[in-house]
Amino acid sequence: MPQGEEKLAVEVAPGKAITAIRTPAAGAPRGWCFVYAPGAGSNVHDPFGAFICRALTDEGVEAVRFQFPYMEARRRSPDRASVLEATWRAVIERVRSPKTRLAVGGRSMGGRIASHVVAQGVPVEALALFAYPLHSPARPEQWRDEHLPQIAVPTLFCSGTRDAFASPEELREAASRMAHATVHSLDGADHGFSTSKASGRTRQEVWEEAHATFRDWLDAIR
């Protein structure tokens, strides 16, 4: 791990803990802590998560990223929703501090489960959903949006225009039913934030745009 990062063991059930990595803020503090969870197929070393957390900490935002119990146990299949939600609650309580405002979120499933606990009333100040899986590509009519109108905090959807799990139009429709939601589209990116040669963009450029969008959005929250 880069110098300054700290590995944490977060207890999520009696005798069971998951790994998290905390990166302290550098430079002038912005007064935020961002907690990130990866998508279903990734772990605490998720490349996009590591990139955005380290980029934010360079700009004064503390960051924590973690993995779910099934990844801790090196299993492939995600845990039940109740376990995933309990993990999010445990991490939030572990990192919460009166000195910073808390933004939570993640990529794909990690962000979706964060949206569940926020909708259920876990107190945070902001929610960031990268590549939110509004529906399965195989079942585009079955939206995962029933809980979204219950979210009262500022929410950012940041997804690619080629994302098969939600088009920009679908995300805008879902966001329109929320109190304080913003949608940002990453031109040419797919669900994994990869790009085609025809787009003229690299994955690194997409990551940098996602980071800058999130940073500026956080700065605008009063």
Image (cartoon, rainbow, N blue to C red):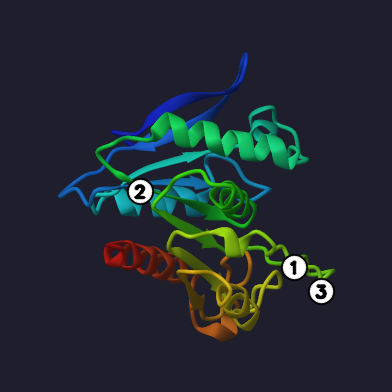
Q: Quadrant of residue 221?
A: bottom left
- Residue 192 image offset from top left, x and y in percent: 61, 63
- Asked if disc 1 and disc 2 are in contact, CB closer than 8 Å, the reply is no
Look at 43% across and 67% down and name the residue there. 210
- Residue 75 image offset from top left, x and y in percent: 75, 33
Instruction: Bin the neighbour count of mark 2 within 10 Å (Cα to Cα): few under 14, some 14-19, many 20 and up.
Output: many
Per the image, the residue denoted by label 3 is 141
User: Of label 3 and label 2, which has the lower sequence position?
Assistant: 2
Residue 143 - label: 1
User: Of label 1 and label 2, which has the lower sequence position?
Assistant: 2
Please indicate, yes or no, whether residue 1 appears anywhere in the rendered image. Answer: no
Local secondary structure at mark 2: helix
User: Which is nearer the eye, 124 or 45?
Assistant: 124
Residue 50 - label: none
Local secondary structure at mark 3: loop
Per the image, the residue denoted by label 2 is 54
Instruction: Bin the neighbour count of mark 1 within 10 Å (Cα to Cα): few under 14, some 14-19, many 20 and up.
Output: some
Question: Does residue 87 appear left or right of residue 31 in this picture?
Answer: right
Q: Residue furthest top?
A: 15
- Asked if disc 1 and disc 3 are in contact, CB closer than 8 Å, the reply is yes
Local secondary structure at mark 1: loop
Look at 74% across and 37% down and name the residue there. 79
Q: CA distance from mark 1 to mark 2?
A: 32 Å
Q: Residue furthest left?
A: 28
| Amino acid type, mark 1 | Trp
